[in-house]
Image (cartoon, coloured by chain):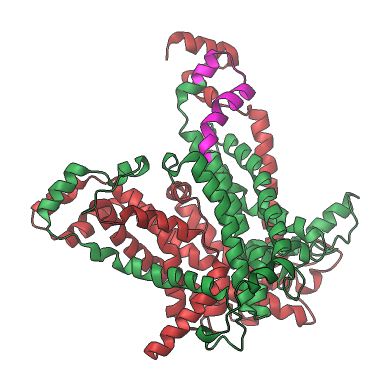
Chain colours: A green, B red
Amino acid sequence: MSTEPIPEVMSKVVARPHIRHRWRVMFHQRPLWLMWPSMFLLIVIIGIPFLIAFYISFLNLTQYTLRSWLHAPWAGLTNYITALTAGNVVGTSALASLGVSISFSVLTTLLITPIGVLAALTVNTQYRGRTIIRALYLVPYVIPTFVTALVWRMMFLNRTGLVDRFLAALHLANVNMYWLLGPNSFWAMVITDTWASWAFIYIMVLAGLQSISHDLYEAADMDGANAWQKFIHVVLPQLRHILGLSLLLSTLNHFNNFTLPFVMFGTPPPVQADVLPLNVYVSSFQLFNFGLGGAMSIITLIIMLIPGFLYIRTLRLGEVKV
Amino acid sequence: MSSTSTTISQSATSRPGPEKKHRNAQEILPPPLRIAVTAILAIFILIPIAYMILLSVTPDTEVGGEQLIPSHWAFDNYINMWTTVNLFQGLQNSLVVSGIASIIAVILAVAAAYVITRFTFRGRLTFLYSLIGLQTIPGVMLLLPLFVVFVSIQSALQIQLVGTYTAVIITYLTFALPFAIWLMVSYLGSIPIDLEEAALVDGATRIQALWRVIVPLALPGIVVAIVFSFLTGWNDVLFASVLTSPTTRTLAVQLQVFSAAQEGGALPLYGQLMGAAVVSALPVVILYMIFQRYLIGGLTAGGVKG
């Protein structure tokens, strides 16, 4: 039996030396077989495909060589070079898509954070009807992404969509904004994802708010702090960790979001909305250049690991209850 | 809480009464501002939803027209949409696939979490942390390799997988596993071990103790895990579009077919499409509303959306 050191976060869950000892006396055998099915499935359905994806990215794999993919010609780093320079036939290189993906995920996260924090503050105090408001806030978040994307596609329909009607009625913009075609498609995507995902920050912040001790607020009251000072000096410092975690997870979730742009724009999407997951999909399943798609997805994964590593290094995973 | 603090905060906010004071200490947004923010958010939330419902009862000929409000309510959209594409089959497939996948996923997760919380073994923490790693892998990256794996298993075992329920169920249940295991680990970890010991001393087997003692106590957590696992399948478009055949298509794919079919057609059936969208969203929204209280804790614990 191993005696590995247990980080603090796990201590509540796993570290029970005395009990462990008693149990070892009671059972000579641990029923480890209970977790074999889970491990088997995780390895076969996620682990092995992951390794295959890595391998494929070094192959010259097309629909003609797919059937005997193990014997496909080795391409070395060609796919990676192609991905970063030339891109697919539709014209977006992985580098350009990377730019779109990063601006999309960072911008959306920056937009939803103040909305989520404000929303959490509106339901942090007791009042009549708070339960209804809390339920309402969750609705956009729980609607399936493919439904959200379809609805906003209707909202952004040129000329007859609600957005164009509204903007034209206020004389703010031309009635032909072409939200789903040109440069505006990026903003259509940002607005839609903001609508769909701000409740994620809201839920996380609300949980954080509820764990702030009441004494802190009262101490601030006694010191004569006004609401704004309380927010800056009491609430925000207490929310630091959970906000950090939420921002990281939110950025990664947006970065990984395939369904929303896929359903909103179809394939191939407008260049300005060609996020990395969509580019991988188009390269692999519409242009049948599986090697290129594989290389792009490896690039995606590496980019996603960077904020994760930075975050874990600065905060230590052990301090955050995941 | 001394009486001094009571008087100070009372005079500061000029609202008497102990509960009021209790409330005001936490108050960051003054009520008028709070109501304004809530109202703006509510409008922001409700406009697209209202628009979806409005379009779903608009005749297809009027969706692209000049008038926003239709000349008459086309409730027959909700009848016709079932025959335009085989929406009912999609609904049925989604229910079967997501339902079976979520139940198996949670059974496996409870079993795994039981071992993880009750016993030590080499690689236990590595296993737990690698679950987080698995969740960050982009789905689109796994799509082709997973297809290759299924095809290889097919030719090795001489069975049909791609296009059947089995492949989709296995896929969804595995994708739901990491989060379900984490959730169950945190639930089972908080159940005192003494209760099981009592059962074991009374002569129950380990599996009986798990079934009779642990499962009833962990029921709230199990509900959360089932709901989230269910949504993994219900919300997926990517894997279902490749792994299903026309007869096993889930609702999400059927809706894609619905909107794609109109692009070449003469008249887009936007009204029916929005009706179908309402029908796809409704079960999920209802599910959340019923289990809302449990789910918020689960959402925070995992920080993921299926």
In the image, taking residue B6 as reference, residue A290 lies left or right, namely right
Q: Nearer the viewer, residue B131 or B267?
A: B131
Q: Residue at x 80, y 56 (%)?
A: A163
Magenta stretch: residue A233 in it? yes
Q: Position of residue B140 (x, y in %)?
A: 57, 69
Is residue B207 left or right of A105 when viewed as pictured?
A: left
- Where residue A224 sits: x, y (%)? 58, 13
Count of labels shown? 0
Q: Pick the quarter of the image with the N terminus of chain A.
A: bottom left
Vertical placement of B35 versus A149: above or below? above
Residue A305 position by quadrant: bottom right
Residue drawn at x 66%, y 68% is A278
Question: Can the viewer see residue B185?
Answer: yes
Magenta span covers which residues? A218-242
Residue B292 lies, with reference to residue B254, above or below; the image says above
Helix, strand or loop for the magenta stretch, by majority: helix
Q: Nearer the viewer, residue A69 or B190?
A: A69
Residue located at (32% from left, 64% from top): B107
Residue B182: name its quadrant: bottom left
- Residue A138 in view: no
Is residue A236 a member of the stretch shown in magenta? yes
Instruction: Find residue A217 and report its horizontal and vertical position in percent.
Output: 51, 22
Q: Nearer the viewer, residue B244 or A126?
A: B244
Q: Is residue B130 above or below residue B77?
A: above
Q: Position of residue A78 (x, y in %)?
A: 65, 73
Q: Horizontally, is B192 left or right of B263 in the view?
A: left
